[in-house]
Image (spheres, coloured by chain):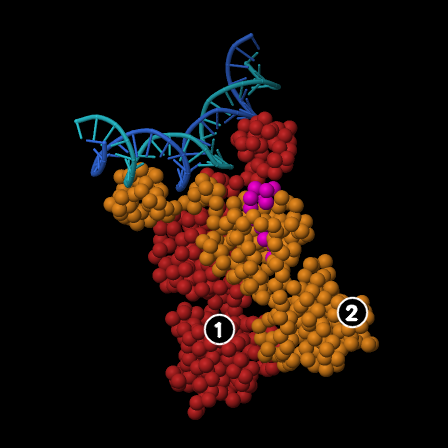
Chain colours: A orange, B red, C blue, D cyan
Amino acid sequence: MKDVASAAGVALKTVSRVVNGEPGVTLATAERVTTAIERLGYRRNESARVLRQGRTASIGLVIEDVADPFYAGLSRAVEDVALRHGSLVLSGSSGEDPRRERELVLTFCSRGVDGLIIVPAGTDHDYLRPELDAGIAAVFADRPGGPDADTVLCDNAGGAYAGVSHLIRHGHRRVAFVGDSASIFTSGERLRGYRRALGEAGLPFDTSLVATGPARQAGLALIRMLSGDDPPTAVFTGNGRITVAALRTGRRLALVGFDDFELADLLDPGVTVVAQDPVRLGATAAELLFRRLSGDLGSPERIELPTRLIPRGSGELPP
Amino acid sequence: MKDVASAAGVALKTVSRVVNGEPGVTLATAERVTTAIERLGYRRNESARVLRQGRTASIGLVIEDVADPFYAGLSRAVEDVALRHGSLVLSGSSGEDPRRERELVLTFCSRGVDGLIIVPAGTDHDYLRPELDAGIAAVFADRPGGPDADTVLCDNAGGAYAGVSHLIRHGHRRVAFVGDSASIFTSGERLRGYRRALGEAGLPFDTSLVATGPARQAGLALIRMLSGDDPPTAVFTGNGRITVAALRTGRRLALVGFDDFELADLLDPGVTVVAQDPVRLGATAAELLFRRLSGDLGSPERIELPTRLIPRGSGELPP
DNA sequence: TACCTTGATGACAACGTTGTCAACGCGCCG
DNA sequence: CGGCGCGTTGACAACGTTGTCATCAAGGTA
């Protein structure tokens, strides 16, 4: 910038004004400056600008794994909203590791992000306190981050309730639940919906029909369950990866899965799912974040997005 | 930092030393400083550090669309490698728009990224010249960015050749090619492999068997082709989205698709594909970038990763 | 005792930008 | 013709950090 200034024969500040489109510069002067900028290939140093103004026009996004289609859709939505607000996105995958989540968040903060969108891996977010006090906004997505934090969720319990009820309506009395570790919020909620559906139908909650854990392990548990005596006649799977694991067992199962996935309709039978909308989730969280950033100081919001049951065949198989 | 210094009763520089683990500070002093840091919840301002040292420990990643599983895998790999090198990743989706690509790249540069990994949407990267001269490293991935730029590609032509030859070996004489717009590098290369396979088998190149364009449009073209007179007996699809579009035509097709996808094995028949390895692509590009960043000034490299034919049934159907 | 070495600590400038305020020239009004 | 206001421009400080160099005290040596 200094070089540009001397090349154009003006003061630093004038160049700054031109670069930022501030008023109070003659057309002729602006012209000279612009020419010099072109000629020298000058680009503003954003770090310095950030240092000076304290605003970075960037937000941090911490998710579990970009390679998971659910989070990939969410990412893209966040990115698009950020772009519309002139912001960049720093993103990182926590891989369900609370330590890594924390590390990412703090790194983002020290880089001066204006706000954060976090899919929390851990449950304790006290480490964020100083940052929040310092005015960094944060929105939690997919899982709650705390009682007084902005949060955007899917209706996990309701979705699971709808899916399991659907199976029961089709005549099933023994419906298995195969899901993620129950310590994960979404998984716990879905299990809750499952129990509620059973309860309302007057069916017992039978722990021998419940398997939780990582996808592969859950798949094995399902196989054991199916080859035991008095096996379930239908299965409700608690997330996309586990739905796929269930499909890989190779059996023709009455099945409803939580989370939609590409090609679900092309399988035989088509896979009935409870669909979430990751794009809407990401967009909603991002919009909320930018509302906060532009000064909305209202009390914390907790938004719950609806899910949608999509019947495709597997959920309508008789016992 | 100033506050910490006065709280601990030391000079600014001493705090800086402690924060950076520099030698030359008594244990007692360090202790006092650390305590003060804890108490005040101090975090180093990375922007200022960047401004001072000119190094940001962050790289920029420009891809076509994070929501596409191929790029999602690539992203995750880049992220992991960057993490291992203590770097952050700024990422953005260009959506095949060269203007947007340029905008993203320049924004990243002005934020002072140390290097870039670019899946180029455009063909002209002259706008990068000033940045490259300024010492920012760039690696192009999946598509070449220019003759003298580091590039990591998949063996597109070879993969397509293998896939089409596979169909021919199974008795097909009329093999259609349905792919992306031929102006996209990967698509052009795959078409080249297709022609080579035909040529080597002594089959004619028949333009009525070639359809290119966006997925939906290509799908429609395929349907027209199949219901014409003298239809193809087999189809080679040029990317994942188009493979899916072909599957959605609902016909039992002899089919080999470029790019693997989840559940390809669960369809009936299983879908034979030419698999690329997005994770390896991303990791290779990132490793190359970090090698450059750590001072490797060798001449530009062009790395071509192999593809792998995975027979699953659809590619082995007879004419 | 005087001098030198060593290690700890601090003062200060610099990175590139922008906000603040002053200076300057010009035309207008009284 | 003098003073005033306005629009343009520039000088300077500040953002928070780190690199450079100076300072200072303690301890060892001649």
Residue B312 in the image: above or below residue B290: below
On screen, residue A213 versus residue B305, left or right, reads: right
Residue at x 70%, y 81% (from the top left corner): A317
- Chain of residue at mark 2: A
Residue B151 in the image: above or below residue A228: above
Question: Is residue A238 or residue B208 the one in the foreground?
Answer: A238
Report the residue marked by disc 1. B239
Report the residue marked by disc 2. A199
Quarter the N terminus of chain B occupies = top right
Residue at x 80%, y 68% (from the top left corner): A205
- Where is residue A283? Give x, y as percent: 54, 60
Label 1: state its secondary structure.
loop
- Where is residue A226? Give x, y as percent: 77, 75
Say the numbered circle drawn on residue B86: none
Residue at x 72%, y 58% (from the top left corner): A183
On screen, residue B242 versus residue A300, left or right, reads: left
| Region rendered in magenta | A130-141
- Chain of residue at mark 1: B
Question: Which of the 4 image quadrants contains residue D27?
Answer: top right
Question: Is residue A123 or residue B37 the one in the foreground?
Answer: A123
Query: Quick check: is B265 in the magenta stretch?
Result: no
In this rendering, does residue A166 appear at all?
yes
Label 2: state its secondary structure.
helix
- Is label 1 in contact with label 2 (beta carbons under 8 Å)? no
